[in-house]
Image (tube, rainbow, N blue to C red):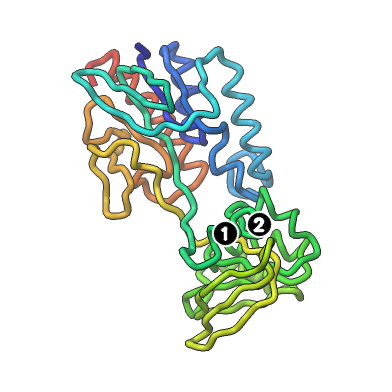
Amino acid sequence: MYETIIVGGGPAGITAGIYLARKKINFLMVTLDIGGQTLKSGGIENYLGHQYITGPELAEKFAQHLREFSIDLKEGEKVEKIEKNDDAFTVFSGNEKYNGKTVIVCTGRKPKELTVPGEKEFYNRGISYCATCDGPLFSGTRVAVVGGGNSGLEVALQMVRIASKVFVIERDNRLTGDKILIDRLSKADNLEVLTSTKVVEIFGEKLVSGMTVDIDGKKKNLDIEGVLVEIGSIPNSHIFEGVEKNLAGEIVIDCSTRTSISGLFAAGDVTNVFKKQIIIACGEGAKAAIAASEYLYMGG
């Protein structure tokens, strides 16, 4: 029986783990990876103490800090369900199950899909949801970045340096990302922005060779070899069905990261916290660890 089980190893989960380790709390961390969505981030210019750092570099610094402590870590495991029985929780991961007096859910989010013909068939054969992971594979090719928000524009900035041609596709009638990103992209001579545009189909043989789009009601085929999808994300909150969630599926928390279930805490992008940022997730993870320790030793 652990005092606390942290589910998820992104910025929120890692910070919670460091705080619990320093408090000598007997805890377990169960996660698919160490770093979470930070691993998929490109250049980061707004994390305190770093004028510029890549997502993988920052994730590695987080991991190094966490591993300074002797902790019980189950990496490479996907939690499928959490149940509460009396005053304890059971966390189910594959054929394993773990028991804890408290749980901190830090499962983050997953990318939204386009849900168009060809998307599933060409996943990892020209379609990617992680430009940081896969962008270099498209060096010298023609690619489409789907999404005109900050994430999409950041990916486009990466790709104009290495791809021969980059299309940015946005359903709205304008790009919705920050002006600083739009200004930077305006300097690229291998970029074409398509607004009021919907993806209809992705096609090819063994690999992606093109995409059909609808531009203001008119169909057009784009000659491309890669599709980078950046249209937002949804919270990984399905593992605990009994907890209160908002209409977006995010776990509802108070300012102390407490959920509607006594002893269950949540932190980071899986929650209804204002804005999804690495530095915010870290702060929420710290709060969750402090709240869980107070629940354990001070009666909540």
Q: Position of residue 103 (x, y in %)?
A: 34, 25
Please give the label number shown on residue 168.
none
Quarter that holds the C terminus: top left
The residue located at (68%, 62%) in the rendering is 207
Seen in the picture, residue 186 relative to 270 is either above or below; the reply is: below
At label 1, which amino acid type do we have? Glu
Quarter that holds the N terminus: top left
Residue sitting nearer the eye, 42 or 204: 204
Alpha carbons under labels 1 and 2: distance apart: 8 Å
User: Element under label 2?
Assistant: loop
- The residue that disc 2 covers is 125
Q: What is the residue that sits farthest to the left in this orientation?
A: 86
Judge from the rendering whether residue 84 lies leftward or rightward of residue 235; answer left or right: left
Residue sitting nearer the eye, 19 or 49: 19
Judge from the rendering whether residue 163 lies leftward or rightward of residue 152; answer left or right: right
Q: Position of residue 174 (x, y in %)?
A: 51, 77
Judge from the rendering whether residue 275 lies leftward or rightward of residue 248; answer left or right: right
The residue located at (61%, 41%) in the rendering is 39
Count of numbered tags: 2
The residue located at (48%, 87%) in the rendering is 217
Q: Are marks 1 and 2 in contact (CB under 8 Å)?
A: yes
Question: Which image quadrant is residue 28 in?
Answer: top left
Q: What is the residue that sits farthest to the right in this orientation?
A: 140
At label 2, which amino acid type do we have? Arg
Seen in the picture, residue 146 relative to 102 is either above or below; the reply is: below
Q: Position of residue 250 (x, y in %)?
A: 33, 47
Q: Position of residue 119 (x, y in %)?
A: 54, 62
Residue sitting nearer the eye, 223 or 164: 223
The residue located at (42%, 16%) in the rendering is 27
Please give the label number shown on residue 121.
1
